[in-house]
Amino acid sequence: MTPYEFDTLAVRAGIARSQFNEHSEALYLTSSFVFESAAQAAARFSGEEEGNVYARFSNPTVTAMQQRLAALEGAEACVATASGMSAILSLAMATLQAGDHIVASTGLFGATQQLFGTILAKFGVETSFVPATDLAAYRAAVRPRTRLFFVETPSNPLTEVIDIAAVAEIAHAAGAILAVDNCFCTPALQRPLELGADVVVHSATKYLDGQGRVLGGAVAGAKPVVDEVLKFLRTAGPSISPFNAWVILKGLETLRIRMEAQSASALELAGWLERQPGVVRVHYPGLASHPQHALAKRQQKSGGAIFSFEVAGGRERAWQVVDGTRMISITANLGDTKTTITHPASTTHGRISAEAREAAGISEGLLRVAVGLESLEDLRADLARGLSA
Ligand SMILES: *Cc1c(COP(=O)(O)O)cnc(C)c1O
């Protein structure tokens, strides 16, 4: 394809019009496809002829979404999955076998930690979790059977920023691939493949849809890896519904504009919170006070739409702040047009032991905000209401 700019690809990549020449992308709700002859059926099944067979393998709406996301990530290939977790599971199943080893950053999404630490462990795949920003720890964790490095940047909820290019170098020196969970930044703000990562995984449930409507996921990157993931998907079946793919396909059209607006509000709110009495600390890569601010400026287009902050007074005070807001949604979800607030220690990180939480820096006074598209003034007023509760 002609090297169009990001904004053009976001609305035009992946279009394949039907005989009706529809302008907006059609939704193909069909689980199977018919053939013109027995010979064509055979050719399609054997892979001799390209084309759709059955929606567990491919569907035109899903293909359009995959092509559009691949274009935005600058990826050779992309495969969509039923959810973000099934994208991560499919990547692991496609690239690892019993006896293999993963090096993963701490601060991963909770279900990802569970998947690596308990479920994959049952099948003989071990994971070493290393402090997210400690490059020497990644190097020291390498074993002869290390096959996969897996990081999430910025991390949740402390927004630690990981040097993707540096970790890619360590992974490649170890003969492993690097996968980056690009859920928080999306390709609108960060393109890990350009920095040396081999694959990107997504929870499309978050910013790619952007409006909190459907579950979805994706693996994008080098064709040999994505082809293996597709083989797993064809057999094991965590494929995305065409309807969900269509919603995400249309969500991608406004991705850059949403991410920019939501990030701009997040920067304003984070800077304002830093000056409020009773706020001990604000974690946001867009602030000069962030320990990896310089790296974030190199690696991301902006600080993103998520920040966390710590109030003095522990859990009791943090809950007061949450309950004192009136408009912001009290939910652990993120990546929506509606702003959300959550208390990680009692929700997303509630199942982790208190000591492990403390070690990870997730204090009882910590709150995480995922900024949406409401008016900045209304958001500031609502947080001020919470803080004065
Ligand atoms: C939500 C999330 C996931 C899991 O995605 P689902 O679509 O809920 O399965 C993975 N990684 C990150 C960073 C997430 O926020």
Image (cartoon, grey):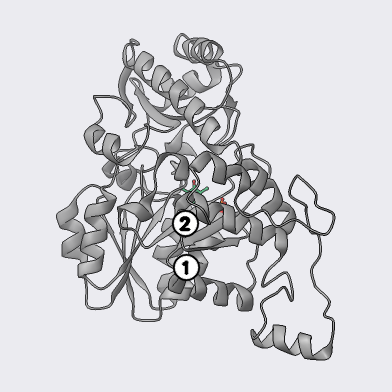
Q: Are marks 1 and 2 in contact (CB under 8 Å)?
A: yes
The residue identified by callout 2 is 201
Asked which secondary structure carries label 1, the reply is helix
Provide residue 7's location: percent of width, then percent of height.
53, 39
Q: Is residue 206 visible?
A: no
Amino acid type, residue under disc 1 in the picture: Leu
Q: Is residue 302 above or below residue 122?
A: above
Of the image marks 1 and 2, the number of the one nearer the N terminus:
1
The residue closer to the viewer here, 37 or 338, is 37
Q: Residue at x 64, y 39 (%)?
A: 212
Q: Is residue 75 above or below residue 358?
A: below
The residue closer to the viewer here, 182 or 308, is 182
Q: Is residue 153 visible?
A: yes
**Left or right of residue 109: residue 243:** right
Identify the mark at residue 383; answer none if there is no mark.
Answer: none
Q: How many marks?
A: 2
**Left or right of residue 75: residue 314:** left
The residue closer to the viewer here, 372 or 227, is 227
Amino acid type, residue under disc 2 in the picture: Val
Q: Residue at x 72, y 73 (%)?
A: 52
Provide residue 348's location: percent of width, then percent of height.
48, 43
The residue closer to the viewer here, 19 or 172, is 19
